[in-house]
Amino acid sequence: MDINGRNFIKFQDRLNKYDLQNSPEAAEKQHSKGKLLAWERIHILFDEGTFEEIDAFVTPASIEKGFGRMTHTFGDGVIIGHGKISGRLAFAYAQDFNVMGGSLGAVHAAKIMKIQNMALKMGAPIIGLIDSGGARIQEGVASLAGYAGIFYRNVQSSGVIPQISVIMGPAAGGAVYSPSITDFVFMTNKTSHMFVTGPNVVKEVLNQDVSFEDLGGAEVHARKSGVANMIYEDEENTLLGVRKLLSYLPSNNLENSPYVFLAETQKDTDEKLREIVPDDTNKPYDVKDVINLIFDKGSFYEISELYAQNIVIGLGRLDGKTIGIVANQPKVLAGTLDINSSMKAARFVRFCDSFNIPLLALEDVPGFLPGIDQEHSGIIRHGAKLLYAFADATVPRITIILRKSYGGAYCVMNSKNLGGDFNFAWPTAEIAVMGPEGAVAILYRKELSESDDPAKLRKDLAAKYRSEIANPYIADEKGFIDEVIDPSITRKKLISAYEALENKHVSVPSRKHGNIPL
Ligand code: HXC
């Protein structure tokens, strides 16, 4: 090429113009709001020097019927490309709020679809960095069609490649639905917001005053709606969080997760595990203490930590291998299963099953949460989601009953007859149709009503039930439990059990797809 030639000068001119889009003024606009430029985000997400942008010079569509104005830019407000994250291929798109509020027009959408197609074809994760006012109003229906095309590709990719959405500014209107289809949603506290309709519309339609933060801030979505799985205090840590999550995941549904071994060996037995479950059966404890003692040191990565805290979900490593953990949390609502915790765990079980991640259920659950509110809101069909998800999963599945395993909750939490591969119990396990107090009240109603001292009779009968029925040994003798184990050997037991399940293969009946109670 002649570097003084006409075409080369034009080429250089284009590069200069492209660079101007990230001028100090443009950077200041974002930085003053505590946000980074799209490019700066990409640099943190990918290994240094590995990101390759494509379609940098496409220009926005023209609008036929002039309403509003279009800003002429190179790239139409979104960066797309590929690079390496911890040495593995990944695809990404990053919206630029400085270009028409990161709004999505036809060309912008076509670029996102292009990168979605590539990620699916290459079998590599895709990460969307979202900072957008939604459908670009000036482009009308073409913007809506663009969103529909993105949603379609999200669905085609679901369960094939990991899809992660990172909200780094507004995600308004159409911008919220792609994230909600993807596997995980990350948000940055205070600077990111998600809503279908913003505070202005809420005011107009309902005459209610609400701030951005209270309507769709990161805290709201992490604690109340459950839309956000992970929140971080700033953008850099949010992006580092995405890198961390990806380190547990395979690149696609045909691969296994990468092994990540600890630098130093960890002993396989730990007597501290014997001391966690209190003698008093009604006393709470933190199931995360159990998780941290079983899994490779420091490897537990909790997901949706702030939402439905009566169940704990997350990824951990056992001798280097990724395992998906679902654990009842006796510290919150006594570990009962309610609508939110059932949905939280069910979606996670489906994710792990899609991506060949073996499952572990740690069980201590007195039952489903009773009450009019739960019943009227549909605990029957929402609880069924968790049941369905476990029963449908073909990855290796192990349960350890730590303490309570009563009623429907026994069945739901990956019991043997639901297809669990190994079910172990600690000696502290209580496995029965219901708890002692409930059982006594039903079976001895007549005796209690006729007794001179019903309180004492109730207490004595409950004690008898607890010692004779509410233990793991009846289930053990009938084969519903494979083994009652000393808690201190739990890690060792699990490592060898998952090794035995390494080549698990299940043939499923031919069908289009099951009909999970959505
Ligand atoms: C075109 C848009 C836009 C949009 C923002 N802008 N949203 N342009 N289409 N949807 C432009 C603004 O005109 C402005 O341009 C620039 O982006 C920055 O916007 P500001 O309002 O100045 O910024 P800020 O105060 O930070 O507020 C950001 C915002 C707000 C919260 C995103 O702009 C907003 O509420 N936008 C509309 C959100 C919305 O209702 N989206 C729904 C679209 S319908 P200038 O030139 O002045 O810098 C939809 C349906 C799809 O998405 C359904 C699919 C299922």
Image (tube, rainbow, N blue to C red):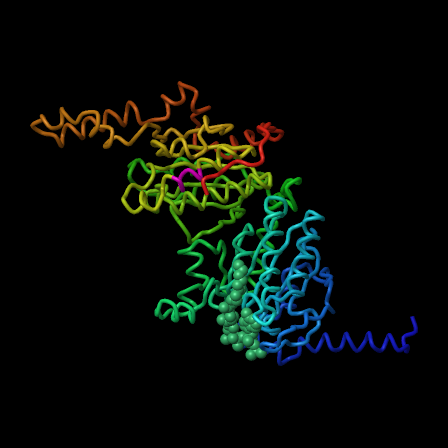
* x then y, percent, for residue 66: 61, 77
In reply to whether residue 512 is colored magenta, the answer given is: no
Direction from residue 14 to residue 507 in the image, left or right: left
Q: Main secondary structure of the magenta part?
A: helix
- Residue at horizontal 46 percent and vertical 24 percent from the top: 482
Quadrant assignment for the N terminus:
bottom right
Quadrant hosting residue 28: bottom right
The answer, for residue 87, to whether it is visible in the render is: no
Q: Which residues are magenta?
A: 381-386
- Closer to us: 36 or 8: 8
Measured along the vertical axis of the image, is residue 442 above or below residue 221? above
* x then y, percent, for residue 5: 90, 77
* x then y, percent, for residue 398: 50, 32
- Residue at horizontal 71 percent and vertical 61 percent from the top: 51
- Closer to us: 323 or 141: 141
Quadrant hosting residue 355: top right
* x then y, percent, for residue 140: 58, 67
Quadrant hosting residue 178: bottom right
